[in-house]
Amino acid sequence: MSMKEKLTEILKENSRLSNEDISKMLGVSEQEVKDMIKELEDGKIILKYSAVVNEELLEDDTVTAFIELKVTPERDKGFDSLGERLQKFPEVKSVYLMSGGYDLLVVIEGSSLKNIAAFVSSKLSTIDRIISTATHFQLKKYKENGVVMGAMAQEGSQRLNLSY
Amino acid sequence: MKELSSKLKQVKPSGIRKFFDLVLNSKDVISLGVGEPDFPTPWQITEQGIFHLEKGHTSYTSNMGLLDLRKEISKYLKKFFNADYNPQDEVMITVGVSAGLDMAFRTLLDPGDEIIIPAPGYVCYEPLAFLTGANPVMVDTREDGMFLTSDTLEKHVTSKTKAVLISYPSNPSGKMISKEQLVDIIETCKKHDLWLISDEVYGDMVYDIEPISASTYVKDRLILLNGFSKNYAMTGWRIGYVACPKEVLDEMVKIQQYNVLCAPIMSQYAAIEALRNGRSELERMRDSYELRRNFFYEGLKEIGFDVEKPEGAFYMFPSIKKFGMSAEDFAMRLLKEGRVAVVPGNAFGEMIDDHVRCCYACSMDELKEALARIKKFIDSL
């Protein structure tokens, strides 16, 4: 693994570590860490730093839906122009082009079920090139971005405090 | 009542038992006293164990262990160390490396024999060797950078010496022996016709260097011990192995036959999966320990510890000599005043009273907090 890859792995796991901590982990100077991070940010390799939140514990009522879209591709542009258009909606968290039974997968966050239903019927279904939609609501998160959620997340390690 | 075994009574109930009990019952303590990985077993390995449980594979296996597992071990030793061991009669699956050690001692040693054991070293070597009636000769390696050198070995060989035990990377020091030093030790063993026991349980957990094994350089007088506990985070599965010449194993298997019979079958199946498909997980864990090693080493140095950068395992073994107290006093005070648990060096050889073992297989948050607490404690001295 290159130094830059190691650095991105560390930041993906915990972006709140200080440059000093990271420099010790990688065995390079703090300045080098700073420079590498700047390079990764400038090169748009690192786009932002965010937290993985267990919304269940926050008692957040946000609703998440996964919407499958079947789409007529556009001449020359394929699915790109629609994909780029969809990502502009603030409700849209992620957009993926998929292989298989449908074309685009759109992840939407809304404050209620009704809210999302309204978004799908008024914003998505009305776009010409969208042939059909299928909306799936997320019921529970077990794991996100490699982090275990829910009851299992509370379970601590069973290691003894002392062993040889 | 008649007396219990007098031999067993002579085995010290680890002088630091009191300290251990205290740590085990302490709350709000950050423990660097752990001797195992902080990862759960990689799921694909666990899943394989569950699969075989569900299929009802809950019987004994042969004393030697599942042939498929022995074949995988044989392939591993060939691939990484160019060592040739016949899976049929030169590899045996054991209940962890500890059971392998016990059997190796009992196979080789008679009462009165001497076995040379470098200190510091893993806690069970001395008592297990002693229980055979042999005399464990503990050799202080602190002056040599925690390695057994061939010169030091030479000085301790007597007409009664029958075997030498080495274990690198070392628990507790994390130090790794160089290829040249290893070859020198093997030459010394040949010269004096000594058996060599090599405990390589941390063998794959090395940083900056390639893993090495005694099995690359010698076979006829080597008893190689290894296992899955550390490399694959499988401590609770209790699975290890011994690889040695057929003539030795033919004897050793008798102990297994009349003792534990075999290692747990579901663990053996899980271990097959570890060797077949677990390498990337092993490397992922190793890379993670390496980052933490680097971090913790810099942290200890900043506080002012004299410490060598270890090449392997997940331990650091700083000297506490300059603080003017014994390892046990240091560990006790650090526990009570600093709320951090470490293991006093004398657990790993009575004379090692000036070092403590710190395990850095903890989360980064724990390591940072532990370093802050240690610094505060040291500043208060």
Image (tube, coloured by chain):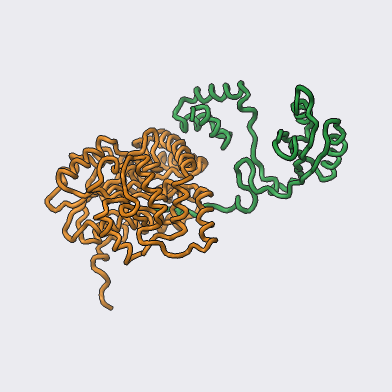
Chain colours: A green, B orange
Q: Which residue lies at the image location 27% right of the left edge and 61% below the top edge?
A: B11
Using the rendered image of the protein, determine whether residue B111 is visible from the camera's viewpoint: yes
Q: Quadrant of residue A160?
A: bottom left
Q: Is residue A159 above or below residue B359?
A: below
Q: Which residue lies at the image location 56% right of the left edge and 37% below the top edge?
A: A13
Q: Which residue lies at the image location 23% right of the left edge and 68% below the top edge?
A: B6
Using the rendered image of the protein, determine whether residue B337 is visible from the camera's viewpoint: no
Residue furthest out toward the bottom: B1
- Residue A98 in the image: x percent, y percent? 70, 35
- Residue B222 in the image: x percent, y percent? 25, 48
Is B113 situated left or right of B27 in this image? left
Is B346 situated left or right of A136 in this image? left
- Report the number of discs: 0
Q: Nearer the viewer, residue A6 or B107?
A: B107
Q: Is residue B117 above or below residue A78?
A: below
- Residue B26 in the image: x percent, y percent? 47, 55
Q: Quadrant of residue A85?
A: top right
